[in-house]
Amino acid sequence: MTRVAVVTIAHGRHHHLAAQHRSLARGTALPDDYVAVAMDDPGITDHLEGTLPRRVVRIERTREGALPLAAARNLGVASALDGGADVVVLLDVDCLAGSRLVASYADVVTARPRTIWSGPVTYLPPPPADGYPDDPEALDAWDDPHPARPRPVPGQLVEPLDPDLFWSLSFAVGREAWTRTGGFCEDYAGYGGEDTDFARAALSRGVALGCVGAARAYHQHHPVSSPPVEHLDDILRNGRLFHDRWGEWPMRGWLEEFERRGLVRRRGGHWERARPAPDAKERTA
């Protein structure tokens, strides 16, 4: 019998985490294991509720103070596989699971284990006064997957998936394919770049990418900035690493918008801050 684990990484977003846990508990198939990776977040256990099996593993920030998103995913998958999982679903902490998400991922990974499978993600509007429904089937009324990604309907598979369109918001992988990928590159820290790097590395190692329409997820609303100015230094650091590994810069749309705002500049084929970070004087004092 196929054992399925769900892994989510979290720093804060505790109410979103609890809502995700409730949505998984009401799916057509339940995960055998639920692993929450707490990134510098000692209070996370207080917000896991319901009857699903669940456990928490912990990881601290990097020495530079960044959240270790890539390393946290690797830790979560390793913990799930060590716990006996055959299929591991990675779900962003902001995502609610559609009613057939776990069942669909389990089916497609079992049938096509050499492929990493993603599912469509809908970005939800702000919740009504009484919150999003706990019944995942009721989320179908909001179903409208992000237009910049493939939008297969339930019952449809999309292959191959462009690696530059891969998101870690919702995907599933089997043990053999994960081992072959080598996991996420842990040189990435903080926000940006590690998803595309992972997808390109997977393809380079003979692991395919696809999208399964029945594994639908719903991203809970929260305020965002566009472009994500608060992640500027992470994006520059991770973008330079991506360039060193793949010969080009990712996230060019954001970088070009940062440039229009006078925050970055291009020099010698690379992007850099146009002016020092706010705490630069303190660091060099």
Image: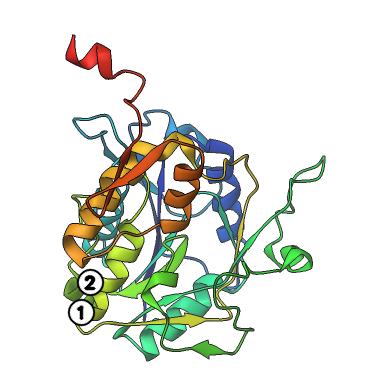
Q: Which mark is residue 201?
A: 2
Q: Is residue 26 left or right of residue 118?
A: right
Q: Residue furthest right?
A: 129
Q: Secondary structure at mark 2?
A: helix
> How far apart are labels 1 and 2 at the CA level?
5 Å
* Residue at the image point whose x is 21% and y is 16% from the top: 283
Residue 100 visible here: yes
Instruction: State whether residue 270 is above or below residue 111.
Output: above
- Residue 140 lies, in percent from the top left, at 74, 69
Q: Is residue 189 left or right of residue 213?
A: left
- Residue 154 lies, in percent from the top left, at 63, 84
Instruction: State whether residue 125 is above or below residue 198.
Output: above
Quadrant the N terminus occupies? bottom left
Could you say which is closer to the camera, residue 190 or residue 7?
A: 190
* Residue at the image point whose x is 26% and y is 44% from the top: 237
Q: Secondary structure at mark 1?
A: helix
Residue 11 visible here: no
Could you say which is closer to the camera, residue 215 or residue 144?
A: 144
Residue type indicated by callout 2: Ala
Q: Which residue is mark 1?
A: 204
User: Is the Cβ of the residue at disc 1 closer than 8 Å to that at disc 2?
Assistant: yes
